[in-house]
Amino acid sequence: MRILITGVTGMVGSHLVDHVLANYADVEVHGLMRWRSPIDNIRHAINRISVHLADLNDLGSLIRLLETVQPDRIFHLAAQSYVTTSFTAPVDTLRTNVIGTSNLLEAVRHSGVEARIHICSSSEVYGQVIEADLPIRETMPFRPASPYAVSKVGEDMIAYQYGLSFGLHVLRTRMFTHTGPRRGAVFAESAFARQIARIEAGLQSEPVRVGNLDSVRTYADVRDAVRAYWLLLEKCPPGEVYNIGGTRTVTIGDILEILKSMALVPVEHLVDPDLLRPSDVTLQVPDISRFQKATGWTPEIELEQTLGDLLNYHRQSLAAGVMV
């Protein structure tokens, strides 16, 4: 079997690489990356996979890639995935996430590849909900509260349309908050962990700068997430959409306190107005029963382990002089 992972150099893509290499010796792993993408997350596996240069915004490059690789499964994980950046660069976010996904699906059509395709949407499509709406089910109306969320609605719907109109074997997921080692430092819990690691190393004296600490999230570990993605294409019929997420619901403030409790030195924090979004989604609690019934998947990694591993990742990166 041959698989293709877009966004292979990202947190999720690199952990999917690790999962496949550790568990499926007969699977040939191919990854899509742009020429300027850093390879730090996959450097340890670079000699065991095939990496191809292409761009979601260049249809021709995608057609050539698919004709070369002829994948049996495609995990489409590449995206502009930072909500805050989407407010300052909405057009780029829409281009990458919507047009880029459309280009990938067009490339599948034109190349004649018959692959099972995972399109990774997001829980952000549901927007702000009220407590009476919880837990959030797949039937919840879309209320996107950021350009990123709008882009994921578009990605979600274009994937549905290509399956409906052209018979592509497409499955969609709406993944709720997930984190772990290799998480980009633009995301809250990773930003906290990186600052704590810098304080421990004597590289930062000021308090940990934070944004909105009251948002409620249900957390999953990225390593549980990639197990779910693999099972999705193993067990689920085309055309379906599934919520995937953890079972531990906390506030962002709780996440901060857990990380502070793991610090080797006393740590204070300060709310930075520049880290507050123009609009925020503050309540995300998923109903994952539909996916669990379809696959038997359940989260296995406890939140404290996830956050401890994330903090150690930043400590090790600082010690090695790696910028993350």
Image (cartoon, grey):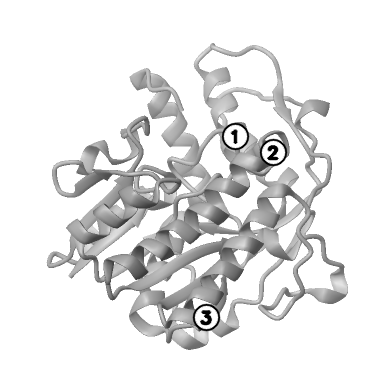
Instruction: Reply above or below: 45 against 22.
Output: above
The residue that disc 2 covers is 84
> Where residue 292 sits: x, y (%)?
51, 82
Badge 2 vs badge 1, beta-carbon distance below 8 Å: yes
Give the CA separation, mark 2 to mark 1: 9 Å
> Where residue 33 sits: x, y (%)?
33, 42
Instruction: Reply above or below: 43 against 74.
Output: above
The residue at the point 12 percent across, 67 percent down is 26
Nearer-the-camera pick, 319 or 73? 73
Nearer-the-camera pick, 259 or 26? 26
Under tag 2, what secondary structure?
Answer: helix
Residue type marked 1? Val
Badge 1 vs badge 3, beta-carbon distance below 8 Å: no
Which labelled disc corresponds to residue 291?
Answer: 3
Q: Which comes before the other along the chain, label 1 or label 3?
A: 1
The residue at the point 64 percent across, 34 percent down is 260
> Is residue 271 shown to the viewer in this render?
no
The residue that disc 1 covers is 186
Q: Quadrant of the N terminus?
A: bottom left
Q: Which comes before the other along the chain, label 2 or label 1?
A: 2
Instruction: Reply above or below: 40 against 254.
Output: above
Badge 2 vs badge 3, beta-carbon distance below 8 Å: no
